[in-house]
């Protein structure tokens, strides 16, 4: 039990070398190295300050919702509403700024914080509803979040009618969107900080271990005194808030509230989580490996952009990568 | 023991109640909209509802075939898009009308069956989670649908195709209704009276029992996905005939609508329960509701919110043992 909780992998005494390799992220690291070296050989412009910065920014916008997905997946759940949450937060950020900037025109920091608070409030609410339906009413997480995603998207598009919302204040997009400290974009720092935070949570904090316990065996979790309902709801709240933060940061980058972003994010985040070794059955998953997987996906996307591959093929690739990753996971885990 | 008996009685009462709640809800929603908007109650519109229901019913039945065996198909909507585009391209290219119609239908059904078989093999043979498999396949199919025609509608196919499959009638009944009716009859027999159908229910109810009963669930489940794909193909061809062109965006909301129809009808996501009849009534409910909202000019995005809410309400009311 404790070994599951600490490492997030089922570590029996007689683990084979192959299992150790998988558990320690050997596959995903290999993928990343192959993708990066391959791209560099095909297109030397890959290693270029501007491209790397761009890549890291895109990585940040993927790793945050991917970590959100990981948190619910370790409890044995799913969150298909991450993309919808990102979109509604983007619209919300722009709307809050648009209306409040006439009330308090010269307070950029207060306005930015108000927008963030609004995003986290809505995120917390959505997460609570998802978590409540899953944990208390025991509904299928996939169906619940599919339905709430439909409701969130409907709300977003009803409000915007598909039109971007302008009104994002300049200081906000300059500071968070384009801002750098010591040559590193602020967004990247936030993404790295969140990743580190979750690594610590998973390894050092009781709540982090409870997430694994709920996902691996509900019965023994209950018997060992884990508050299952509370833990599950908290997982969904954290996930939705992370997605909301992503939407908030993306708005700073885009300079307007976009209700149509995030459409493929449910798939991308599940792909990142699965490639990063998170089990679809719950109980297994580590933040640092999910981050590596997100970096791998970002590098492949970046490579396809550099090689001028049509964006429609990028969706195709994503689908293929996801299924291939599942296939590999499946065949390796069968062979033990 | 007492707890058991109580639970059994409660679930019995619930089923009995559920048998009547849905038809009652259909009638209540219909009357409600008729009061607000008299056009809802017109003969033309009732005819419309019946025709519309037959399209959705085909998709809901397709979804049901796999849900019964604890599966799921999230690629349904984009399969519709791809079938629409490819069958239209074949219809346009084949020249001579009767030949073109035959070739178009065959091509459409073949594409749909291949997508279904791909899902089936990945899920039943390789053993990957159905939700994530069909989500991945959905994206592959989506990008193909928007690539083969460069994202543009394919128009200019023989008018005979639309004339028969959309406007035509057999024995006074519209062709879509006839096709849906025939598929319903065939599926009812298949699901209830054949080895294949019963195996699906056993696999869905309890995979271990299925193994004990000597059912080789791999081929059965793979076949179910292939059947699901083929059914989607029929629905997609009928929709293409109605639109009059191959549309890369035809599938849009259909995945969610088909799931909603099946779940509202009482098909349990935990598998082993509910049949094509449930899918049919569920499809009728969703159609009556969306028809009423269309006629009372409810915004399309608000309808999307309603669809999500309906799924959750249906899940809550049919709550049993749940799974991922």
Image (cartoon, rainbow, N blue to C red):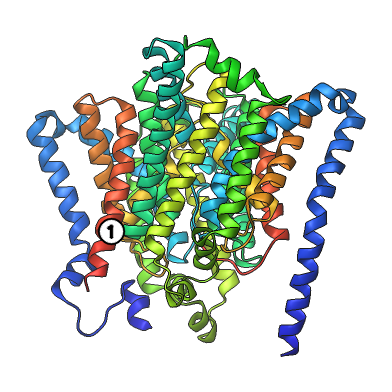
A31 sits left or right of A65 in the view: left
Tell me residue A23's x, y (percent).
24, 68
In the depicted view, which residue is nearer to us: A325 or A52? A325
For the C terminus of chain A, the image quarter is bottom left
Q: Residue at x 20, y 71 (%)?
A: A19
Residue A114 appears in the picture as rendered: no
Tell me residue B299's x, y (percent).
71, 27
Crowd band around label 1 with a 10 angstrom C-alpha radius: few (<14), some (14–19), many (20+): many
Q: Quadrant of residue A174?
A: top left
Q: Residue at x 45, y 35 (%)?
A: B79
For the N terminus of chain A, the image quarter is bottom left
Residue B179 appears in the picture as rendered: yes
- Residue A280, compared with residue A20, is above or below; it is above
A212 sits left or right of B250 in the view: left
In the depicted view, which residue is nearer to us: B81 or A48? B81
Chain letter for the residue marked with disc 1 in the picture: A
Which residue bears the numbered disc 1?
Answer: A289
A306 sits left or right of A136 in the view: left
Q: Quadrant of residue A184?
A: top left
Tell me residue A326's x, y (percent).
31, 55
The tally of labels here is: 1
- Residue B150, compared with residue B221, is above or below; it is above
In the depicted view, which residue is nearer to us: B119 or A272? B119
A235 sits left or right of A26 in the view: right
């Amino acid at each position: 039990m404790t070994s599951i909780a600490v490492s997030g992998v089922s570590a029996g005494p007689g683990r084979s070398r192959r299992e150790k390799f998988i558990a320690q992220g050997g596959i995903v690291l290999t993928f990343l190295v192959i993708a990066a070296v391959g791209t560099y050989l095909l297109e030397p412009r890959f290693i270029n300050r501007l491209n790397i910065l761009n890549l890291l920014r895109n990585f940040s916008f993927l790793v945050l919702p991917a970590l959100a997905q990981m948190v619910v997946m370790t409890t044995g759940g799913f969150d298909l509403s991450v993309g919808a949450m990102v979109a509604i937060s983007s619209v919300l950020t722009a709307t809050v700024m648009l209306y409040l900037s006439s009330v308090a025109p010269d307070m950029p920091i207060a306005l930015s914080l108000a927008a963030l608070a609004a995003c986290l409030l809505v995120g917390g609410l959505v997460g609570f509803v998802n978590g409540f339906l899953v944990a208390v009413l025991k509904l299928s997480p996939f169906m619940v979040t599919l339905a709430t995603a439909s409701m969130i998207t409907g709300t977003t598009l009803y409000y915007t009618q598909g039109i971007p919302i302008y009104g994002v204040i300049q200081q906000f997009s300059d500071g968070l969107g384009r801002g750098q400290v010591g040559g590193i974009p602020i967004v990247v720092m936030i993404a790295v900080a969140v990743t580190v935070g979750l690594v610590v949570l998973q390894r050092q904090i009781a709540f982090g271990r409870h997430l694994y316990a709920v996902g691996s065996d509900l019965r023994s979790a209950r018997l060992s005194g884990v508050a299952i309902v509370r833990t599950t709801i908290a997982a969904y709240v954290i996930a939705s808030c992370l997605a909301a933060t992503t939407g908030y940061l993306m708005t700073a980058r885009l300079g307007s509230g976009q209700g149509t972003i995030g459409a493929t994010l449910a798939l991308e985040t599940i792909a990142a989580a699965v490639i990063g070794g998170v089990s679809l059955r719950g109980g297994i998953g580590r933040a640092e490996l999910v981050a590596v997987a997100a970096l791998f996906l970002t590098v492949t996307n970046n490579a396809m952009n550099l090689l001028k591959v049509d964006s429609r093929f990028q969706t195709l690739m994503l689908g293929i990568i996801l299924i291939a990753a599942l296939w590999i996971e499946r065949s390796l885990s069968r062979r033990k | 023991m007492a707890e058991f008996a109580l639970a059994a009685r409660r679930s019995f009462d619930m089923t009995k109640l559920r048998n009547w709640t849905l038809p009652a809800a259909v009638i209540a929603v219909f009357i409600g909209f008729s009061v607000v908007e008299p056009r809802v109650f017109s003969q033309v519109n009732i005819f419309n509802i019946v025709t519309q229901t037959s399209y959705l019913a085909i998709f809901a039945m397709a979804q049901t075939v796999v849900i019964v065996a604890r599966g799921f198909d999230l690629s349904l909507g984009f399969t519709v898009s791809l079938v629409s585009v490819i069958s239209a391209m074949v219809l346009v290219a084949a020249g001579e009308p009767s030949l073109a119609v035959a070739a178009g239908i065959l091509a459409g059904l073949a594409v749909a069956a291949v997508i279904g078989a791909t899902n089936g093999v990945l899920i039943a043979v390789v053993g990957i989670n159905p939700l994530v498999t069909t989500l991945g396949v959905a994206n592959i199919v989506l990008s193909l649908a928007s690539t083969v025609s460069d994202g543009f509608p394919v128009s200019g196919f023989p008018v005979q195709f639309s004339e028969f499959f959309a406007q035509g009638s057999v024995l006074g009944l519209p062709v879509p209704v006839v096709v849906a009716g025939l598929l319903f009859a065939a599926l009812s027999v298949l699901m209830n009276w054949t080895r294949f159908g019963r195996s699906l229910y056993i696999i869905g109810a309890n995979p271990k029992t299925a193994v004990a009963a000597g059912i080789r669930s791999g081929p059965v489940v793979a076949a179910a996905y292939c059947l699901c794909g083929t059914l989607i193909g029929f629905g997609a061809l009928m929709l293409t005939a109605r639109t009059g062109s191959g549309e890369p965006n035809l599938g849009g909301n259909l995945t969610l609508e088909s799931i909603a129809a099946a779940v509202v009808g009482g098909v349990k996501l935990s598998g082993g329960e509910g049949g094509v009849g449930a899918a049919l009534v569920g499809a009728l409910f969703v159609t009556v509701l969306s028809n009423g909202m269309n006629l009372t000019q409810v915004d399309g995005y608000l309808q999307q919110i309603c669809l999500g809410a309906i799924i959750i309400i249906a899940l809550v009311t049919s709550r049993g043992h749940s799974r991922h």
